[in-house]
Image: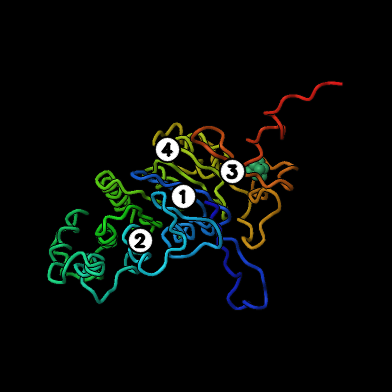
Amino acid sequence: KGLTKTFPLSRTIIGRSAQRVRAVDGVDLEVPGGLTVGVVGESGSGKSTLGRLITLLDRPDSGTITLGGTDITQARGKRLTALRTSLQVIFQDPLGSLDPTKSIGHAVAEPLFVHGRIRRGEMREAAGDLLARVGLDPVLTERYPEQLSGGQRQRVCIARSLALSPRMLVADEPTSALDLSTRSEILNLLLSLQEETGQAILLISHDFATVQHLAHRVAVMYLGRIVEEGPAQEVVGDPLHPYTQALASAVPVPDPVVQRTRRRILLNGEAPDPANPPSGCRFRNRCRHAMASCATTDPPLIALSATRKVACLLHEPSSPEPAREPAALP
Ligand code: SF4
Ligand code: MG
């Protein structure tokens, strides 16, 4: 709730300039158990920072993080160590997240050993069991990261994240470094493991098609804010925010006739400097529907129905007081 995180604009000018970038700017998001929430947006939209805040890898400047109703925002020391078993992350680059000097078996079973769930002598067997759960041959426990393919390495990272049966898994671009044929295998693996474990997944991706494939709900981020949120099929099939409309128009559709007749919506220009977002709606310099009021009014994320939210003046009630009784005529 209300998560905000700022970073100094440049490390070289710390102390000289007070200018800071709001990487995440007042974000509310709920990830229900057993479901996947996809966070989509361009690079620099703040989605990775949001994932790091949720898993306590970074601390927010303001706002709260609750896990199963318990406020964990300020967890430190032993409490934080215990919480680490509930919050796991997998990253884009599986090679970068694996120690090249440690065997696969060690990498996979290490969390269990570190948290005192198994003894050293039990590591190999535990690792073999975890590898089998992600569709890998247990003989791979003897190998080293370099000897595996990219897809196998990401399976190893998933196996390691599963070890402690976390309640929440943040997957930050988990398939971006993989070749196309391996991507859907990894996504389907995450999906079937979720059915088994009931864990909540936050799937971070710049690719709308990936998120649509896996997520139950989607949150679209632009310059640190959520601009649209709702059930995945509705957001992709009937996007409401002009930014979401552009992202959704780039998702390939299986029907060649629809694909040919559908118009791709191109965004004007580049994303603005995050340290210096436009006044009013921060999407307005790229929006094909921008109106005069968009320069002065910063649209809040409002609920249009029980399941959908959008931050755009086109979807605001036209009058600021539509729900009130009309004033009596003189
Ligand atoms: Fe476009 Fe205005 Fe809506 Fe922003 S508020 S997305 S500029 S129409
Ligand atoms: Mg990122």
Distance from disc 3 to disc 2, alpha carbons, whole Å, reads 30 Å
- Residue, x 56% and y 34% (percent of image)? 304
* Relative horizontal placement of residue 36, taking residue 297 as reference (left or right): left
1, above or below 326, in the image? below
**Residue marked by disc 1:** 39
Q: Measure the alpha-carbon separation of dots 4 and 1.
A: 20 Å
Q: Is mark 4 in CB contact (under 8 Å) with mark 3?
A: no
User: Residue 18 at x, y = what percent?
Assistant: 67, 71
What residue does disc 3 label? Answer: 301
Of mark 1 and mark 3, the one earlier in the sequence is: 1
Residue 84 horizontal/vertical position (percent): 34, 62
Give the mark nearest the N terminus, 2 or 4. 2
Give the residue type at disc 2.
Leu
Q: Is residue 126 left or right of residue 312?
A: left
Q: Which of the pair 64/154 is nearer the observer? A: 64
- Which quadrant is the C terminus positioned in? top right
Q: Is residue 150 left or right of residue 314?
A: left
Could you tell which of marks 4 and 1 lies nearer the N-terminus?
1
Tell which circle, 4 or 3, labels the residue nearer the N-terminal end: 4
Scheme by which the image is coloured:
rainbow
Q: Amino acid at mark 3?
A: Leu
Which residue shows up at 39% across the image and 36% down it? 254
Residue with the mark numbered 4: 253
> SS class of the residue under badge 1?
strand
Quarter location, residue 102: bottom left
Q: N-terminal of the two: label 1 or label 2?
A: 1
Label 1 environment density (alpha carbons within 10 Å; few <14, some 14–19, many ≥20) = many
C-alpha span from label 1 to label 2: 23 Å
Residue wearing tag 2: 83
Whole-Å distance between the Cαs marked 4 and 3? Answer: 29 Å
Q: Identify residue type, mark 4.
A: Val
